[in-house]
Amino acid sequence: MGLFLRSPSMQSGPSFPNEGRVTIEYRGRTITGTYSAHAGKITVAAMLGSKTARIGAESAIAAIVMAELLLQQLADEGKA
């Protein structure tokens, strides 16, 4: 079970977009969701649910990893 970043909009760079798409490979399937980051929180939404977590301001990479993990949790719960 591995997570692989596939979304060009999620590549690390000088700034992290507040909203966009996140895509992972999960158990042989491509899972896509959307994310929204505001006020120290990131929310990832998939077909049948959403999850929110706190994120720090330390780096865009931390927010990317959190978005991927939230999408994986939604897939584990059958909501993506």
Image: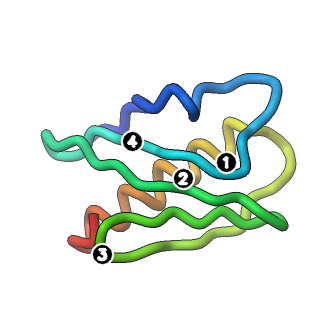
Give percent across and percent down for residue 11: 59, 26
Residue at 37% x, 32% y: name it: 4
At mark 2, the secondary structure is helix
Asked if residue 56 is positioned above or below residue 6 in the image, the reply reads below
Count residues near mark 2 (Cα–Cα under 10 Å), then give few for <14, some for 14-19, many for 20+.
many
Q: In which quarter of the image is the N terminus?
A: top left
Mark before the other along the chain sequence, 4 or 1 = 4
Give percent across and percent down for residue 14: 81, 24
Report the disc number at residue 28: none
Q: Name the residue under label 4.
A: 23
Count residues near mark 4 (Cα–Cα under 10 Å), then give few for <14, some for 14-19, many for 20+.
many
Report the disc number at residue 48: 3
Looking at the rendered structure, the kind of residue marked 4 is Thr
Residue at 81% x, 55% y: name it: 56
Total label count? 4
Asked if residue 4 is positioned above or below residue 43 in the image, the reply reads above
Residue 64 quadrant:
top right
Report the disc number at residue 63: 1
Looking at the rendered structure, the kind of residue marked 1 is Ala
**Spatial distance from mark 3 to mark 1, Cα to Cα?**
22 Å
Count residues near mark 3 (Cα–Cα under 10 Å), then give few for <14, some for 14-19, many for 20+.
few
Looking at the rendered structure, the kind of residue marked 3 is Leu
Q: Name the residue under label 2.
A: 67
Mark before the other along the chain sequence, 2 or 3 = 3
Q: In which quarter of the image is the C terminus?
A: bottom left
Give percent across and percent down for residue 38: 78, 63
Residue at 85% x, 44% y: name it: 58
Asked if residue 49 is positioned above or below residue 73 in the image, the reply reads below
